[in-house]
């Protein structure tokens, strides 16, 4: 096929992270690729077992089986949660450009990266709909888009399930979580979310999507609102996770 070399010449496939050229094998990319080069992928710390079966936190031991961590044993915030990789290196830079730099096109590579790393979990989770963590309308006007919704669109298409936007709402303004300690983060978002139409979600397995898991307080506040709507389960997914020191 002569079209591929011509397209590569006119629009060379470049790594979203370092802008280096990525050689394409074959006439078509199957499955779709996130277009992050091997060198940058090698600098991303992907999360793997052993993990907490509830919140998805990685354990320090190199070997072992997945089990519930102490915090989730006493107060499980989710049915289950998983993140694709650690928030560091090229991935952190991509998410920062996506979230704060107006680079909306990065939703596709970030969503594909999350799907490919969490494909087995997502398949076994059996989510019936995708629900993105919502932004307050003031924040949405400032940013112009909801980064979680854009990632949710990618995951919803790959999983062939609908994304439900506007039902889970942020009902009050909250200060940015950045810079707050864990306790203040919980207080900041407590009661900040509500479900507009509980009947539309009642009994469903909801895939809750966000870009980053830091302390989990925002996701947990969303879970509280979804549980009030009598959902069957909340399965939380994020592209990255910040590891607490």
Image (tube, rainbow, N blue to C red):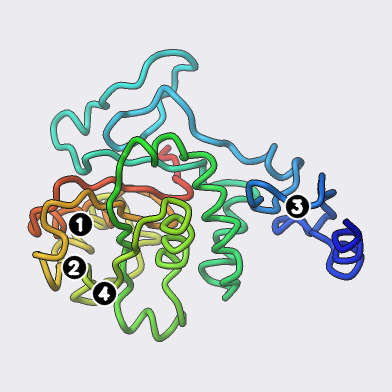
Residue depicted at 44% across the width and 57% down the height:
211
Q: Position of residue 83 (x, y in %)?
A: 43, 43
Query: In the rendered image, which residue does mark 4 sit on?
Result: 166
Q: Position of residue 92 (x, y in %)?
A: 57, 53
Q: Is residue 106 above or below residue 110?
A: below
Which residue is situated farthest in the top direction here? 64
Query: Marks 3 and 2: CB-CB under 8 Å?
Result: no
Q: Is residue 154 above or below residue 50?
A: below
Tally the numbered discs: 4
Residue density around tag 2, few if under 14, some if 14–19, many if 20 or more, within 10 Å:
some
Q: Nearer the viewer, residue 216 or 119?
A: 119
Task: Decide which of tag 4 and tag 1 comes sooner along the chain.
Answer: 4
Task: Decide which of tag 1 and tag 2 comes sooner along the chain.
Answer: 2
Query: In the rendered image, which residue does mark 1 sit on?
Result: 221
What secondary structure is marked by label 3? Answer: loop
Looking at the rendered structure, which numbered label has been put on residue 5? none
Task: Decide which of tag 4 and tag 2 comes sooner along the chain.
Answer: 4
Query: Marks 3 and 4: CB-CB under 8 Å?
Result: no
Query: In the rendered image, which residue does mark 2 sit on?
Result: 192
Q: Position of residue 231 (x, y in %)?
A: 14, 52
């Amino acid at each position: 096929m002569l079209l591929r070399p011509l397209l590569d010449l006119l629009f060379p496939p470049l790594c979203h992270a370092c802008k280096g050229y990525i050689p394409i094998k074959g006439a078509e990319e199957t499955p779709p690729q996130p277009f992050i080069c091997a060198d940058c992928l090698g600098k991303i710390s992907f999360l793997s077992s052993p993990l907490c079966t509830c919140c998805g936190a990685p354990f320090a031991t190199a070997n072992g089986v997945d089990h519930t961590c102490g915090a989730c044993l006493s107060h499980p915030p989710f049915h289950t949660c998983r993140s694709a990789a650690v928030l560091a290196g090229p991935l952190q830079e991509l998410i920062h450009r996506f979230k704060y730099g107006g680079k909306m096109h990065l939703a596709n590579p970030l969503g594909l990266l999350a799907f490919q790393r969490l494909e087995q979990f997502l398949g076994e989770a059996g989510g019936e709909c995708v629900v993105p963590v919502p932004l307050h309308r003031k924040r949405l006007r400032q940013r112009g888009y909801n980064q979680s919704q854009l990632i949710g669109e990618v995951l919803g298409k790959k999983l062939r399930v609908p994304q439900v936007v506007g039902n889970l709402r942020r009902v009050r303004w909250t200060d940015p979580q950045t810079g707050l300690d864990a306790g203040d983060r919980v207080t900041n978002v407590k009661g900040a979310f509500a479900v507009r139409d509980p009947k539309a979600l009642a009994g469903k397995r909801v895939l809750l999507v966000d870009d980053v898991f830091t302390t989990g307080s925002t996701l947990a506040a969303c879970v509280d609102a979804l549980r009030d709507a009598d959902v069957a389960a909340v399965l939380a997914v994020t592209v990255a996770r910040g590891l607490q020191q």
